[in-house]
Amino acid sequence: MNTSVELCGVTLKNPVMTASGTFGSGAEYSEFTDLNRLGAVVTKGVANVPWPGNPTPRVAEVYGGMLNAVGLQNPGIDLFCERDIPFLKKYDTKIIVNVCGHSTEEYVEVVKRLAEEPVDMLEINISCPNVKEGGIAFGSCPKAITKEMKKYAKQPVIMKLSPNVTDITEMARAAEAGGTDALSLINTITGMKIDINRRKFVLANKTGGMSGPAIHPVAVRMVYQTAQAVKIPIIGMGGIMNAADAIEMILAGATAVSVGTANFQNPAVTMEIVEGIERYMEKYHVSDIKELIGAVSE
Ligand SMILES: Cc1cc2nc3c(=O)[nH]c(=O)nc-3n(C[C@H](O)[C@H](O)[C@H](O)COP(=O)(O)O)c2cc1C
């Protein structure tokens, strides 16, 4: 049975990866999950300098998932290169670094700094709903920023798209026209929660990004539509809680899948998803996982 997939010329041993934001340096996560078992790890977003993130409270539980407005708190690229990359290099898995910034210049600084680092791919987060500049503003016109990233990146570039747009395929085509090697979708869907007793917003940021199982059908639909619209590979994410959800995403057209919120409930979930995909392949006599990519039919 072959579970390996090709993503922008990089071979992943299986299509399962963590979603950005699941862990910080990786050290705490590796206590629960054998990172050697995963196709790739995607890091938390890293910027040119340390970011403190948003004021608290910045996470809240909601029906079918959670809201977060962490605001891309991160240690900055220097500490990241010194501490986090060497840590992740100890494992037999691919490293995808998620990059964030407030301006094109800030993104470029991080991408240039990563050029000589032993990382496999860059995921460019142009879609965070919780930062004022850099997120949504770029997310709604991805062609120009994609071109800039491609100018300086030494590794394959994956543009991460926002679902908070009218037409996801328009965004996907624009990023493809800008030269991206792959796409990641979806980031969180903007939401809000109000504490009726205090008559106040639950999150200090007022709004937050919704993630978890309730957004899964939206993500499957967007991955499917995007797969019809572009030729480049897609990493599908959004509410994947188990192997069935991951397989659904692959059938919709994803070459690989990322798992985020489910890790907060069960930190061993990614390994269980790898095993569940293997069981599914056995049951349906699928010898190569590539047969499943986009294999949904009417
Ligand atoms: C607490 C938290 C932090 C996140 N941080 C990032 C981030 O730094 N960069 C990014 O591109 N996406 C980030 N995301 C979005 C996830 O990577 C993912 O796109 C989204 O949560 C949908 O997947 P899920 O439902 O499996 O969590 C974060 C999500 C959560 C819940």
Image (cartoon, rainbow, N blue to C red):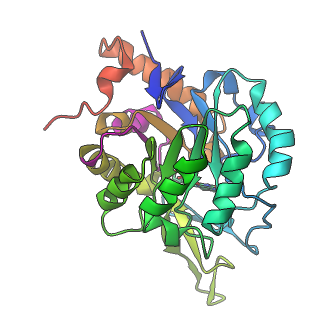
Q: Of residues 229 and 243, which is closer to you in this image?
A: 229
How many numbered circles does the render carry? 0
Q: Is residue 137 visible from the viewing direction of this image?
A: yes
Residue 121 percent location from the top left of the image: 59, 37
Q: Is residue 2 above or below residue 84?
A: above
Q: Is residue 44 visible from the viewing direction of this image?
A: no
View extreme (front): residue: 151
View extreme (left): residue: 298
Q: Quadrant of residue 59?
A: bottom right
Q: Of residues 149 and 222, which is closer to you in this image?
A: 149
Residue 116 percent location from the top left of the image: 73, 36
Image quadrant for the C terminus?
top left
Say whether residue 112 is left or right of residue 190.
Answer: right
Is residue 247 located in the magenta-colored stretch of the structure?
A: yes
Is residue 35 located in the magenta-colored stretch of the structure?
A: no
View extreme (bottom): residue: 199
Residue 270 percent location from the top left of the image: 58, 33
Which residue is at 75% across, 58% downward?
48
Residue 275 percent location from the top left of the image: 51, 21
Image quadrant for the N terminus?
top left
* Quadrant of ligand 1 in image: bottom right
Say whether residue 217 is left or right of residue 124.
Answer: left
Say whether residue 256 is left or right of residue 253.
Answer: right
Which range of residues does the magenta coloring cover? 229-248
Q: Is residue 28 above or below residue 149?
A: above
